[in-house]
């Protein structure tokens, strides 16, 4: 038996095919009594409307938008492209259709009202969020939070990443650590800035106004700010830059001033973008699992659309994979470690080899020691005096 068609439903219900179509695609335009006849006829005939018609019948479009809310951004922005990839992984194999754009472009598109949900990535403003809410569009935020809105948001634990940076630099013997702050979204700026100040304070490290330099988000602005920061008698021995592009500006400034990285200056960025291994020296940076953030966004969106879960209350983060500091050459060797290598070079017989260091617990009965070439314990007074610094506590340089 052939599948029933819209014409069969039209004949049985006594209405036109156009009315049958509207009953499934735009039910608000059909009288309730007429809709009842159409749906009854469809049920009797076991008529199954198309996927589009079914979506419209339940007043959904099955369309979700991913909008990048960053001034001057494009869909090729590496950070947000990674998040978008995670969203697409979750969308594939579902009935949803994903629309990708920037908030600026979206304001001029005819499709802006034809979506069920939107994922706003970056610095979404209150007016944009309010507009979507007026249209009954479900909203999920990523890499930001919005005061005054009870919305789910997915963020990386930036504060944890900053703490990892401070501990890494402290382990290298750096105590004069500066921060290069980019003008990013209020959420990102405040989170990373406050985490840096808290980490420094908790570890008893000095921070004053001269240790914090603010710049725009481009390399040239970062270079100029870094030149002012580094070209002074009390310059820092390490710089934490808010992202990798700013860190590249710090490296550029260091070269202009004749500073060696990492011997004279350690540099660490944030985001672990594609440029990190391309720079010279390779840049240490905090890795963010952007794809996982995107997957979490889509999980939250699906829960909202299906009514199977509630958004995180009070704008709380839904969680993401913890950030991880990727250590590369630009920060591996600090002033303390450099001084210790110099001391060890005077070991009698010059038998010490860097690669021969064996880690020993600070709590061993005999205390930490160093093994020299030939796998024998060195009894040199110099080695014995500094071995606990190199081999003891996990914060010390030999563990980095």
Image (spheres, grey):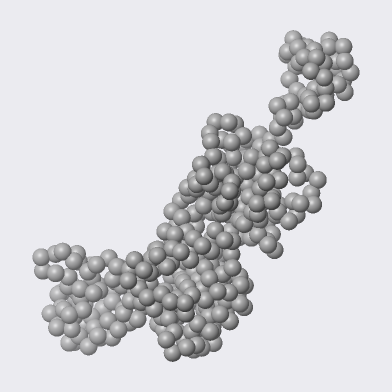
Name the side, left or right, on which 394 lies relative to 144: left
Please name the residue shown 83% across and 22% down the image.
30
**Which quarter of the figure is the C terminus placed in?**
bottom left
**Which quarter of the figure is the N terminus placed in?**
top right
Name the side, left or right, on which 80 lies relative to 209: right
Looking at the image, the residue that sits furthest to the left is 365
Can residue 74 be seen from the camera position used here? yes
Please name the residue shown 78% across and 25% down the image.
27
Q: Is residue 347 above or below residue 197?
A: below
Q: Position of residue 138 (x, y in %)?
A: 64, 40
Front-most of residues 254 and 105: 105
Looking at the image, the residue that sits furthest to the right is 16
Name the side, left or right, on which 74 lies relative to 310: right
Front-most of residues 11 and 216: 216
Q: Position of residue 159 (x, y in %)?
A: 44, 59
Name the side, left or right, on which 357 lies relative to 154: left
Can residue 89 be seen from the camera position used here? no
Front-most of residues 179 and 150: 150
Please name the residue shown 59% across and 61% down the image.
185
Please name the residue shown 52% across and 68% down the image.
242
Q: Is residue 33 above or below residue 81?
A: above
Q: Position of residue 305 (x, y in %)?
A: 61, 34
Q: Position of residue 204 (x, y in %)?
A: 32, 71
Q: Hey, which quadrant is residue 8 in on the image?
A: top right
């Amino acid at each position: 038996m052939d599948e029933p068609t819209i014409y069969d439903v039209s004949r049985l219900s006594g209405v036109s095919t156009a009315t049958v179509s509207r009953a499934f695609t735009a039910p608000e335009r059909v009288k309730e009594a007429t809709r009842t006849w159409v749906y009854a006829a469809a049920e009797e005939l076991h008529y199954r409307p198309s996927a589009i018609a079914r979506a419209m019948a339940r007043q959904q479009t099955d369309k979700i938008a991913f909008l990048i809310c960053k001034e001057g951004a494009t869909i090729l922005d590496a950070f947000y492209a990674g998040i978008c990839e995670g969203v697409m992984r979750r969308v594939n194999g579902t009935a949803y259709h994903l629309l990708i754009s920037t908030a600026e472009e979206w304001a001029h598109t005819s499709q802006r009202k034809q979506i069920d949900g939107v994922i706003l990535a970056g610095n979404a403003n209150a007016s944009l969020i309010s507009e979507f809410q007026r249209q009954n569009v479900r909203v999920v935020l990523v890499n930001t939070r919005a005061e005054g809105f009870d919305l789910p948001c997915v963020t990386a634990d930036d504060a944890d990443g900053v703490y990892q940076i401070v501990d890494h630099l402290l382990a290298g013997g750096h105590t004069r650590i500066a921060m290069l702050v980019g003008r990013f979204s209020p959420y990102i700026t405040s989170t990373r800035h406050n985490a840096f100040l808290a980490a420094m304070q908790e570890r008893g490290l000095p921070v004053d106004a001269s240790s914090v330099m603010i710049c725009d988000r481009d390399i040239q602005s970062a270079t100029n700010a870094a030149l002012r920061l580094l070209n002074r008698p009390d310059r820092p021995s390490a710089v934490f830059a808010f992202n990798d592009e700013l860190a590249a500006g710090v490296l550029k400034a260091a070269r202009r001033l004749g500073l060696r990285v990492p011997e004279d200056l350690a540099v660490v960025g944030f985001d672990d973008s594609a440029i990190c291994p391309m720079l010279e020296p390779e840049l240490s940076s905090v890795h963010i699992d952007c794809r996982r953030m995107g997957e979490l966004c889509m999980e939250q969106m699906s829960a909202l659309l299906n009514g199977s879960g509630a958004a995180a209350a009070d704008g709380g983060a839904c969680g993401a994979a913890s950030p991880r500091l990727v250590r590369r050459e630009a920060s591996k060797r600090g002033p303390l470690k450099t001084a210790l290598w110099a001391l060890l070079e005077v070991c009698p017989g010059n038998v010490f080899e860097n690669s021969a260091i064996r880690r020993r617990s600070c709590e061993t009965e005999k205390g930490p020691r160093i093994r020299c070439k030939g796998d024998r314990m060195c009894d040199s007074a110099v080695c014995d005096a500094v071995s606990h610094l190199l081999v003891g506590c996990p914060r010390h340089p030999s563990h980095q």
